[in-house]
Image: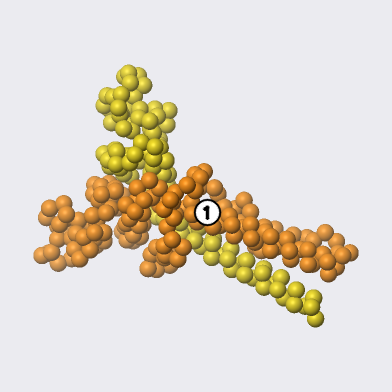
Chain colours: A orange, B yellow
Amino acid sequence: MGGNSPCASCKLLRRRCAKDCIFAPYFPSDDPHKFAIVHKVFGASNVSKMLQELPVHQRADAVSSLVYEANARARDPVYGCVGAISFLQNQVSQLQMQLAVAQAEILCIQMQQEPVMPTPQMDPDDKSSYLFHDSLPQYLNFSSSSNVIHDSFKRESIFGHDMVS
Amino acid sequence: MSHSTRCAACKSLRRRCTKDCVLAPYFPPTNPQRFACVHKIFGASNITKMLEQLPLHLRAVAADCMSFEASSRVEDPVYGSVGIISQLQEQIIEAQSELVKTKSEIAFHNAQQQL
């Protein structure tokens, strides 16, 4: 980082941007909004503490997710990110139902074709049978009463790269 | 509120819990961990500010959501609740692909029936 231009964080906090500023690699001066929103929601000292507790190679992802969360909370001050989680959980439930219906239909077809077939052996490792049944923990018990459904979350990729969790 | 029934926030911040404490309804003393999480991630003054900006009838849900986000971040300091969003998005893609596969099997069987 060039010694002359302070990072966005130090600019906002009106302080000297040290050579080892913890924010500098992740909050360049050309994107002041990025730090502003994170500071507004989490506070600069909390963010600094969180980053300090992480190994360096994980900090970029941590900043990206904090920015995402902060923006979500700015857009929806009640539900924040949880609005998206609720929406996506509903989508998963709907897909589970559709999949169960389709799988039942396949079973019917198979049973019609071979009426004397013994009870089908369900392979417990077969991902296509009862996929996701009980495998998705219920994170929330919120009713989806949020008025703000984040349409952007349907297709938005959170990070520019593939995230391995 | 008397000294012995301070909310979790005021207990943690070692201050008097007044009758109109903003945080008291949402951070009862019976669940100190809940406030500890939000305090660590958002900070007491940010939480207070965020709740104060909301109408009363929305504050309980907002506090619950912020608690959830804070505890998710404590559990996963890199991705927090965004990690859950990513997992759900991946599961949706998998489920959609499985559904397409199953539906095309049905279509194939139906087509064969008609032959």
Q: Is residue A97 visible?
A: yes
Q: Which residue is mark 1?
A: A89
Q: Toward the viewer: A141 or A78?
A: A78
Name the residue nearer the viewer: B103 or A120: B103
* Residue A127 screen position, x and y as percent: 65, 62
Q: In this orientation, does residue B40 appear?
A: no
Q: Is residue B14 above or below residue A8?
A: above
Name the residue rendered at 42%, 31% in the picture: B31
Residue A144's place in the image compared with B101, above or below, is above
Residue A61 in percent (x, y) is at: 35, 60
Total labels: the figure holds 1
Q: Residue B54 is drawn in which quadrant? A: top left
User: Mark 1 is on which residue type?
Assistant: Gln
Quadrant position of the N terminus of chain A in the picture: bottom left
User: Residue at left 14%, top 61%?
Assistant: A6
Residue A32: quarter of image: bottom left
Query: Which chain contains the residue that carries disc 1?
Result: A
Residue at the right extreme of this rendering? A116
Where is residue B67 shown, x and y percent of the image?
40, 41
Which residue is more in the foreground, B53 or A155? B53
- Front residue of A120/B50: it is B50
**Which quarter of the figure has residue A2?**
bottom left
Residue drawn at point x = 63 percent, y = 54 percent? A133
Spot occupied by residue B52 in the image (x, y as percentages of width and height): 29, 38
How packed is label 1: few (under 14 Cα within 10 Å), some, or many (20 or more)? many
Image-based side of A103 in relation to B80, left or right? right
Position of residue B106 in the picture relative to residue A165 (left or right)? right
Q: Residue placed at 49% from the left, 44% from the top? A: A142
Q: SS of the residue at dot 1?
A: helix
